[in-house]
Amino acid sequence: MSNPKMDAKKRYSAGVLKYAQMGYWEPDYTPKDTDVIALFRITPQDGVDAIEAAAAVAGESSTATWTVVWTDRLTACDKYRAKAYRVDPVPNASGEYFAYIAYDLDLFEPGSIANLTASIIGNVFGFKPLKALRLEDMRLPVAYVKTFQGPATGIVVERERLNVYGRPLLGATVKPKLGLSGRNYGRVVYEALKGGLDFTKDDENINSQPFMHWRDRFLYCMEAVNRASAATGEVKGTYLNVTAGTMEQMYERANFAKDLGSVIVMIDLVIGYTAIQSMAKWARDNDMILHLHRAGHSTYTRQRSHGVSFRVIAKWMRLAGVDHLHAGTVVGKLEGDPATTKGYYDIFREERNPMALENGIFFDQDWASLNKMMPVASGGIHAGQMHQLLTYLGEDVVLQFGGGTIGHPHGIQAGATANRVALEAMVFARNAGRDIWNEGEDILRDAAKTCTPLQQALDTWKDVSFNYASTDAPDFAPTSEVSM
């Protein structure tokens, strides 16, 4: 569909025009290398043209309002209008369309996730002509990427600080996540770390409650970390959640964690983008690893037709500067299609992401030397899945076995030992050239012959799986045939 230029007098006459007529649809536009590009999945209301819907999204996320305003002519309006330039039907989804929209770089404040999100998702998601709207992916130009700090520590330096190479890191979330006293909480941390884990972790909603003040938790946890390190000769850590009601409280807690010798602190996604960037800057300045729990994300990332894809959240958080982010397990209890999850992990760990529609990645993305993020896999995983986890997720990942450690029939330390032995046996087999995907169960059984805790773990959880259809699989799949 062409878009002939409207006569200037008609274009700026008082009244209402279609968004496409106002210049927000330009099918002949070629995006510049410096443009920010957003891909939206749009579901127009019945009777609303898909191109007009795309133009409306472009307009309402940049310079437009519902009626013509003459003050546009006081600006370089042709430059500042976002431009919908391509609309494609979504495969196998009647009534849904992919809309490609380009934004001039000057529309965005450098180094601000808050400004980026206020522009791209700030106003359009409640727009009445749309039944649903989802931000599927973004192309962030190098010129924009370089205005951000990126991960405070990065994977390479994190491994150097922990002195752990050649295998995934192991962790566990303390359970129950609410109700333990500080002393008992510290006991869980000590047992898990002494048994062989690298990390333990506060959960998203453990902050400073009547049953355990944050300062007590930090003191008991760091005592546990230090004792476990002394007992094992390994560097250990525990994610101390510094999430609080104000930035002043968060800085106070983070500084106390640093003073106690912690190597890592934790925040929740729900604190907001500006707070996340502020804590990332603090972490860079104080040589701390920053873990981000993605608390609340599924309220807007899980449904395919409306919200924001987690791959977009992953890109924003790499810019914002966190070191760790939960990214799915594939085999655990939480949402995670294998192909989609691979796309997430690639965004975390690669220097450049080529377009990979089969993994939900719609654009080439160059990360311009920003540090890499460490993905965290947690939620319903256990030692019996070790071959699947290593195959799906690779080596640069934190595998967090919460219930799969603390729920062990012979106690927390035994659960940790079972996970460590299972991991090292699987890594050894992989390095020896064995097919761990097909031989994984045999490898675990052989390792369990000389490790009673592992045998007990395999017996306890041998029948546990979470096999449900994914709600967020890619729209495209590889085919051996040439598309015509």
Image (spheres, rainbow, N blue to C red):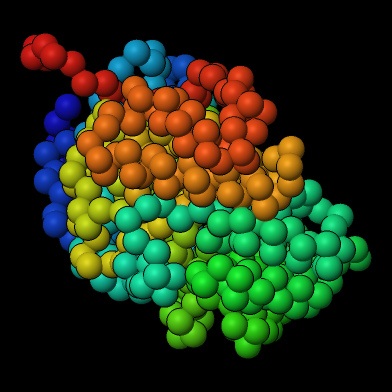
Residue at image coords 20%, 53%: 352
> Where is the N terminus found, in terms of image quarters?
top left
Which residue occupies the extreme right position in the image?
210
> Where is the C terminus found, in terms of image quarters?
top left
Residue 439 visible to the viewer: yes
Which residue occupies the extreme front position in the image?
450
Residue 248 visible to the viewer: no
- In the image, residue 349 above or below residue 458: below
Residue at image coords 32%, 67%: 156
| Left/right of residue 8 with respect to residue 178 in the rendered view | left
Q: Position of residue 56 (x, y in %)?
A: 38, 39
Residue at image coords 28%, 23%: 476
| Left/right of residue 208 with respect to residue 460 in the rendered view | right
- In the image, residue 72 above or below residue 442: below
Residue at image coords 21%, 21%: 478
Q: Tell me the quarter of the picture where residue 231 sits.
A: bottom right
Q: Position of residue 96 (x, y in %)?
A: 39, 22
Q: Position of residue 90 (x, y in %)?
A: 32, 21
**Which is nearer the eye, 9 or 337?**
337
**Which is nearer the eye, 236 or 256?**
236
Which residue occupies the extreme bottom position in the image?
259
Q: Position of residue 411 (x, y in %)?
A: 74, 46
Q: Tell me the quarter of the picture where residue 210 sits.
A: bottom right
| Left/right of residue 477 with respect to residue 253 in the rendered view | left
- In the image, residue 329 above or below residue 317: above
Looking at the rendered structure, the number of numbered marks drawn on it comes to 0
**Which is nearer the eye, 153 or 97?**
153
- In the image, residue 411 above or below residue 257: above
